[in-house]
Image: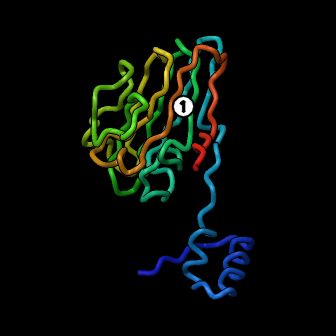
Amino acid sequence: MVFVRRLSVAAALCAASVGATGASPVQAQQPAAVAAQQIDPKWMRVATDTKTVTFELIAGATPLNGALNFNGFRDGELTLTVPGGWTVVMNFTNHDGMLSHSAEIVWDSMPVPLGAVDPAISRAYTKDLEQGIPPGGGKDVMRFTATPPGSYLIFCAVPGHGAGGMWIRLKVDASVTAPKISLTPKPATR
């Protein structure tokens, strides 16, 4: 089966130049066709008066990793940082058209769990963790207090999904004064 993707003019020129060096056109188009996901400021709303952050958590937001991603990121590539003691509201939507997904906050440890475990923060999980929220727009809401300070994962607990890369990071930090979303720096390689 051959998949055809639309390419931007720049990506098409890049693919054509790589193809001119002898690489097959299909091989050349794959890396050029995948654009880096960007942080969308609409994913987060902050109410400083009530110390509440509302985060739009979107399962299967893009085709990346077979749709095993949150907001188009996988394997911890995105970090939500929240001041300690703030209220966190995560509006979960399953955008994936085929698979059920869930979310829970677990401790940051490797390897990630194979399925649902006890959440690291009280009430920090969606319903039906192992069965997941239905595809095509299923919704749920997590509401919890960001405590204790530490490093966590926002993890899909449907068996195998988290281990397949469907997790991003949550940092609860007593030293910050406002929530933020950032790209997670890649660890240095040797």
As rendered, which of 110 and 159 lies closer to the eye?
110
The quadrant where residue 94 appears? top left
Q: Quadrant of residue 114?
A: top left
Label 1 Cα neighbours within 10 Å, binned few <14 / some 14-19 / many ≥20: some
Q: Residue at x 44, y 45 (%)?
A: 59
Note whether 152 is above or below 29 in the view shown: above
Q: Residue visible at 57% across and 85% down?
A: 24
Quadrant of the drawing holding the N terminus: bottom left
46 w.r.t. 15: above or below: above
x and y percent of residue 14 in the render?
A: 71, 75
Front residue of 75 and 13? 75
Q: Residue at x 33, y 42 (%)?
A: 133
Q: Nearer the viewer, residue 16 or 185?
A: 185
Whether residue 15 sits left or right of residue 145 in the image: it is right
Q: Which residue is mark 1?
A: 55
Count all numbered tags in the image, as a single digit: 1
Where in the figure is residue 177, as x and y percent of width and height? 66, 16
Q: Regarding mark 1 in the picture, which secondary structure is present there?
A: strand
Q: Hey, what amino acid is under mark 1?
A: Phe
Note whether 9 is above or below 135 in the view shown: below
Q: Nearer the viewer, residue 24 or 89?
A: 24
Which percent across, then down, holds residue 179?
Answer: 62, 24
